[in-house]
Amino acid sequence: MSELPIRDELRGIQAYGAPQLDVPVCLNVNENPFPPSEALVADAAAAVADAVRGLNRYPDREASELRAGLAAYLERESGVSLRPEQVWAANGSNEVMLQILQAFGGPGRVALSFAPTYSMYPEYARDTATTWVTAPRREDFTVDVDAALEAVATHRPSVVLVASPNNPTGTAVPLDLVRRLHDATEATRTVVVVDEAYAEFRRDGTPSALSLLAGHPRLVVTRTMSKAFAFAGARLGYAAASEEVVDALRVVRLPYHLSAVTQAVASAALRHADELQARVRQLRDERDRLAEWLRSTGLEVADSDANFLLFGRFSDRHAVWQGLLDRGVLIRETGPDGWLRVSVGTPDETAAFTAALTAVVGDGARAGATVVTGER
Ligand SMILES: *Cc1c(COP(=O)(O)O)cnc(C)c1O
C-alpha cells in the first residue's frame, strides 16, 4: 500500500495501551475488582430499557439530569456545593482531558505536568498539537512548589496538569501547590487541571481540590467513574469547574457526544453511590495492609492515596513482572526504572499476588530480580 498522508508526528507510531491479557489475576490497570451489585445491575438494566425506547431521538446534548446527579454526588463526597452548570461529563475522563486540550491547548501552546505521571497525557497533547513539557518531581514523587512555579514561569503553559493522587506513584499534592499554581499564572490565564481520578481512595486528611473551586475560576478538577465507582466499562468521566470553563468545553465537544445509554447507566450508578463507598473503604484498608506487607519484605513503597501501589526497586523489573505473569498475576511495568505498579484487588487477589511475589523474589538471584536497597 502506498504511504498514507498521516500527520508527520503520527508516522510510524503504534497504538499504545496496557496489554489486555487473559490472566487469572489482573492487577494492571487500577480497576475496581468488585463488579457492580445485583441491585445496581437491575436498576441500570431498567434504565437502559427506558433509554432504548427513545433511541430514535438524539440524546440530551447537555446531559442535564446526569450533571445534576454528579453535582449532588460531589457535594456528598467532598462537602463542596456546585451548580449542575459547573459540572461537565464525557466518555471517560480521558475524553474530558482531550476536550480541555482542544479548548485551551493547540498549536503554539504548551501543556505542563510533573513527571513521572500519567502516560496518556502526552498523547492528548500530541493529538491536539499542543507542546508537551514536564518538570521533574522530587525523589519521593512529591512536587516542589518553588520548582513548579519556576517551570510555569519558564514555559508559560496554557494548561497545567496535576494528577492527584498521581498515577503511577499514588502521590497526592497539597492544596497549597494548586492554589499557588493558579495564582502565579494570572498573567498567562493558565488553566490548572487537577486530575482526581483516584480521589475517593484518598487517606483521611488528604483534601480534594474541589474545595478550591470557589474563587479559582481557571481551576478544573476531573473525576471518573472508572475507579471508585467500579464502572470502567461504562466510560464516564467528568469535570467540575467554573461555568466559563464548562462553556468552553461545550464548544469543542462532538454533537451528542454522550449516548443516552451512557447517561442512563451513569445516573443509575449514582443512585447506588453509598454502597460503592463501602467497597472503597474496604479497598483503602486492603491497600494499607498490602503496603505494610511489601515494606515488611524490605521493598520500598511510595505513599499512596490511590487504589494501587508503586513498589521496588528491582535491578531487573521486567524479570519480576514476567515472573509474576508466569504465575498468573498481571501487574504493570510502569513508572521510573526499577519500580512496578500493582492495583489493589480482592483479598484473594492480594493473596495470589503476595504468594507469587514471594516466589519470584525468592528466585531473585537466578531471575536477575534482586531487590535494590539503600539510597536512591
Ligand atoms: C485511570 C485514570 C483516569 C481515568 O480515565 P477514564 O477515561 O475516566 O477511564 C484518568 N486519569 C488518570 C491519571 C488515571 O489513572
Image: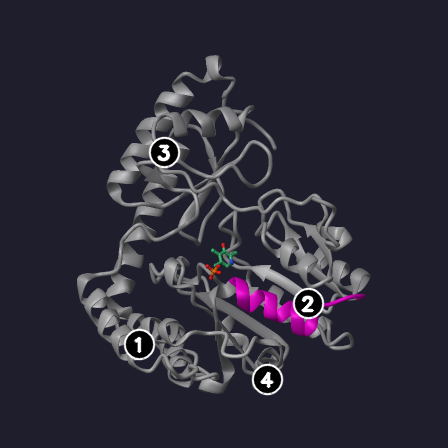
Q: CA distance from mark 3 to mark 2?
A: 37 Å
- The residue shown at (30%, 70%) is 269
Name the front one of labels 2 and 1.
1
Residue 371: percent from the left, percent from the top? 50, 24
Question: Which dot marks residue 329?
Answer: 3
Tell how many labels. 4
Q: Residues within 10 Å of mark 3 (few under 14, many from 20)?
A: many
State which mark lies toward you, 4 or 1: 1
| Magenta part, dominant SS | helix
Q: Amino acid at mark 3?
A: Val
Residue 218 shown left or right of residue 26 in the figure: right
Q: Residue at x 23, y 67 (%)?
A: 40
Residues at discs 3 and 1 in contact (Cβ within 8 Å): no
Quadrant in the picture for the C terminus: top right
Q: Nearer the viewer, mark 3 or mark 1?
A: 1
> Which of the two marks, 4 or 2, is nearer to us in this view?
4
- Disc 1 target residue: 52
Figure check: 222 above or below 171: below
Question: Which residue is depicted at the point 26% across and 69% down?
Answer: 274
**Ligand 1: does it lie within 8 Å of the C-beta at label 1?**
no
* Label located before the other in sequence (3 or 2): 2
Q: Quadrant of the N terminus?
A: top right
Amino acid type of disc 2?
Answer: Val
Residue 212 location, x and y as percent?
Answer: 54, 76
Q: Are marks 4 and 2 in contact (CB under 8 Å)?
A: no
Element class at badge 3: strand
